[in-house]
Amino acid sequence: MDTTGPDELERCVTSAAGALRAAGGLDWSLPAAGLDWSCRDTAVHLAGDLTGFAAQLAGRARDRYLPLTVGAAPGTPPDGLVDLVEAGGRLLVAAVRAARPQDRAWHPAGLADPGAFAAMGAAELLLHTHDVLTGLGRVGHPRDRDAAAVLDRLFPHAPRSAAAGPWASLLAATGRADVPGVPRQRVWRWYNDAVRGEGVALCAIGPRSAEDLLAGGTGGFAWTPDGPGEQVRTTAARVLRTPYRSAGGAAGRPAGRPAYAVVRLSDHLAVGSIGPRSAPDADADTDTDTDADGYASGDITLAPSARGEGLADRALAALRRSPPAG
């Protein structure tokens, strides 16, 4: 697995800042590609994300965003905006270097360790530099090596295109590009704390994903051809009935145990769901009746094409090894 640590993040900071400075003479009031922001506003947003990540990790904020706002003085030229981006990136590099492996801090995509913050920072740099440069009519900063590490750490549920490469796969996973064989997601997120097991990853189904599933969408996952089934959408309905602890102005963690999409790592396709306290289903894949932190085999439903592979056992085993939710 590729990893993103402080050295890799520092490389991303240097590369992104260099690419953005090379476009400093262009009109940054133009809209960034695919966003509702101008290129200028996108750069300020990027600087804010990087600085905010550094503050979250350094402050060990556990349940909400710290009350921090990053802005740019009116009339700041593009070079000054890049200075802000570079400074925020280097602050995050320093915070990641100083953090202990066991340190965690809050983010809407799940409690994040130092490696997750490094990967999130790299993702923001890669994607928003692409957005700005594409909006300015420049080539959008392809970075296969760094994109591969971001995919491995944050996107276990995103299929890869061997032909197009990791960079194109990351753009597809974040709704930015159409790549043959890789679904372009209209609802997407990354996962800081996916539960990983042998050949499987369990990705929490949050309210936004649940709403999309109930509306007939994918919930931000790429599914097997026979998914998501009706039982998956029933799981999504339960998610929307679950109280969520509010944090930082957004829905935080569920008050009870979360529901998960079950992702098969051999092809990064979602193959079913697991949710606590559901009624056992006659069509579910019930390879085992072993409980795992309150989950049982009757709580797992898998698409017919994914049954018989032992995925239910592997999902329950991963839950047994994972820390309690929340």
Image: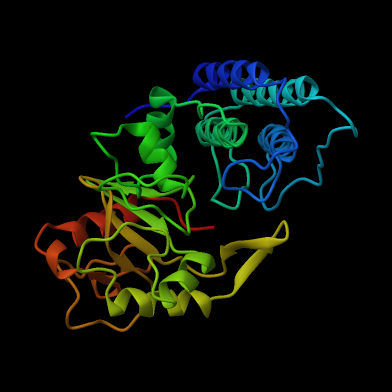
- Report whether 187 appears left or right of 63: left
Position of the C terminus, as image quadrant, is bottom right
Left or right for 44, reference 318: right
Depth check: 65 or 317 in front?
A: 65
Here the colouring is: rainbow
Locate residue 165, reporting x and y percent: 31, 32
In this picture, is 21 found above or below 102? above
Q: At 37% from the left edge and 30% from the top edge, which residue is drawn?
A: 148
Instruction: Give the image quarter of residue 163.
Output: top left
Q: Quarter of the image holding residue 277?
A: bottom left
* Residue 131: image location, x then y, percent: 58, 37
For the image, the number of numbered tags is 0
Q: Position of residue 78 (x, y in %)?
A: 76, 24
Residue at image x 76%, y 45%?
66
Foreground residue among 296 and 262: 262
Looking at the image, residue 65 sits to the left or right of residue 228; the answer is right
The answer to whether residue 139 is seen in the rendering is yes
Q: Residue furthest right?
A: 74
